[in-house]
Every structure is written in C-alpha cells, then in structure tokens.
Amino acid sequence: MFYTSFGALVREAPGWAWRALFDRRTVTFLRHREALGDTLYVSAVARALKKACPALRVAVVTRRPEIFVNNPHVDEVRGWHLMRTGMTVRGSYRIKDLVTVEHVVEIQWRRLWEELKAYGVDSPAGAKLPPLDGYQPELFLTATERAEAVARLAPLRANGKPVVLLSTTGKLKPTHNREWGQQNYERLAEALALHVNLAQAGGEEPLLLKGAPLPQHVGLPVRQAAALFAAGDCVLAQEGGLMHLATAVNAPTAAIFGGTILPAQSGYEQNENFWSRPECSPCLGHGQNCAHLKCMVPLSPRKVAAGIAALLLKHRNFTLPQESLDAAPDTWEPPAFVDRAALKKELEKPTLQIAT
C-alpha cells in the first residue's frame, strides 16, 4: 500500500472499490518505484495499448501521478494503491535485461502482453504482438505551465541569445559508472558562454563559470522542470530521468550515455546521443562499479559542443560560431573517482567502438 495524498485516497476509493468488483475491462499499470525515467516509460506503453485496444480502459497507479495529468491515453490516474485487482500489470523490465541491446520499452511491451494473455486478453487481429507505437514518453503541459516557464527564462533571453540548459546529474545507483564529470561540464560551459545563455537545471553540485555559479533552476517539481525544458532552446543531460523528461516535452536534447547503457536500450533517435561501446559495454546489468570509465574517453567537450550546435541549428536556426567549438577541449577529463592506472591499462585494448 502507498498513497501520495490521503485525501485523494478517501475521495477515490469508493469508485475504485466498485470497479474492482464489477469492471473487467480496466488494465491498471502499477508502478511502485519513484524513478522518473521508468515512470515516463509507462506513458509510451499505455499509449500503445490504448491505440491497439481502444475498448480497454487504461489506469495508472504511481507515486508520480502528476506525470499523467492531461494524458489523453490514460483514463484514470491514482497516486495510491491498496491491493492488486482485476487486470493489474507491471509491464516492467529487470536490470539483468540490460546486458542485451534491446530498448526497454520493447521489453516492457512484450512483458505487458504476457501478463494480459494470462488475464485472457488476446492480441488484436490475432497478431503475436501488436505493433508498438514508438518509444518516446509523453508529458502534456498546460498553456499556463508553459507561460510560467517562459517567464522564468525571460531574464536569460534579454540579450537575444539562445538558452541552453545543463543537467549534470549522473547515476550513482545502482552502479557508480555513468558520470561525464563536473569538470567537463564546466569546460564546455566556458566554451559556449560567449554565444549562448547557460543555466543549470539538474545536478548535485553547482556548475561554475569563471568561479561563479550558473543561474540555478535545480530541484523544480517535475512538471515545472518539464516546462522549463520545453521553453529552452536546448537541453544537455546525462542518460536518466531528466533526459527522458526533456524528450517527453519534445525539447531539443543532447544526451550523454557513455557505454553503461546504450541509446538503443533507453534513448531516442531524434536526440543527439553521445556514446561509445568498448568490450565491457553495456554494463548496467553487471551491477558493479566501474573504476576506469573507458567508455567516456571519446566523449570530449568539443564533441558534445558540436552536438549542441547541431540541435540549435536544426531546431532554432541558430549557428554556433566555430570559435565556440574550437574553444571546447578535445579531450575528456576523468572525474576524481576514476583510477587513472586502470584507465591507462584499459585504453591499451584496441576495442573501442564510437558513435555520436
């Protein structure tokens, strides 16, 4: 059992009890975890289910009900859970699934239909598995939310330059191996600062530019953060919840993966994705910390700057001057926790595959 609002539980429980007893067409997605990215994935799976089987009623039970407000593919959203009833499904994936290169939304879609078949729900038209309606998550903002975000960024736009939002949040759990490194973000910021306006939208430590923190928009409620991303001109994020959130509102997004988990597993084709695949990648399913971060070596600040430049040109018709790209270092600097000796030894193995 859990609830995000006791008042909502009291108001909604009678209707839920009635449906639990008499309704046999509601599919209820149960998402116990608070993980932002995993919760957003539910929006993609629910959309595909609603399109494949319009007669089914789709409910989502989550600790983050605000994500599904105004979602046209979801008929009911609850921030509380008492017990499994009717067609309660998880449609989930496991960490060990990530040792193979398959998108997690594909995995969840397949698992969902395994669960539905156990409830006696057949795939439409006799197909073994209905077509999946893409991987992209969705979050539907109101006009008011968008306007408030535009107003929040207005001071940064006073000089007419585009706004680039930076999120330095890496993944310390379950493994300490998905961090591009604070110093690389700061070196990138120094190169971009003359020609774009920068702000920090996520991260455990403030990003410094010439010793002073960037404008801070860290720790916003999830819908405010989503609106901020939609109002900006480009978002740079590491693979994780904020990357998924930016994509869910169609923000031009550059995403740093490294090789722990690959774009083909959790990314989106429309983004600028930065990754490499040494022989040890993908490694998230291994459940071990990485001492060397070999997979980050090809992902220099200059390469990331080029990706940001491509997004600004494509989506905002803004050309980032070549001097900004040239000012960004062409080498990646390992974070302090990296074992330099182990990294040197790893780089002697000529097996690195690179793509951006």
Image (spheres, rainbow, N blue to C red):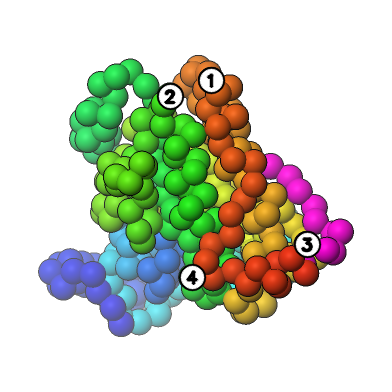
Q: Are marks 2 and 4 in contact (CB under 8 Å)?
A: no
Between tags 2 and 4, which lies in front? 2
The residue lying at 37 percent from left, 22 percent from top is 161
Between tags 4 and 1, which lies in front? 1
Circle 3: element type: helix
Locate the N terminus by quadrant.
Answer: bottom left
Q: Which residues are magenta?
A: 346-356
Question: Does the magenta portion include 302?
Answer: no
Check disc 2 and report the residue beneath it.
195
Check disc 1 and report the residue beneath it.
321
Q: Amino acid at mark 4?
A: Leu
From the viewer's perspective, is residue 301 above or below residue 88? above
Q: Quote the CA–CA distance across marks 4 and 1.
A: 35 Å
Report which quarter residue 294 is drawn in: bottom right
Q: Amino acid at mark 1?
A: Pro
How many numbered marks, from 0 up?
4
Nearer the observer, 233 or 345 = 345
Q: Quote the CA–CA distance across marks 3 and 2.
A: 35 Å
N-terminal of the pair, mark 3 or mark 2, is 2
Report which quarter residue 104 is drawn in: bottom right
Q: Are marks 3 and 2 in contact (CB under 8 Å)?
A: no
Locate the C terminus by quadrant.
Answer: top right
N-terminal of the pair, mark 4 or mark 1, is 4
Check disc 3 and report the residue beneath it.
347
Question: Does the magenta portion include 352?
Answer: yes
Q: Is residue 349 left or right of residue 257?
A: right
Q: Quote the CA–CA distance across marks 4 and 3.
A: 23 Å
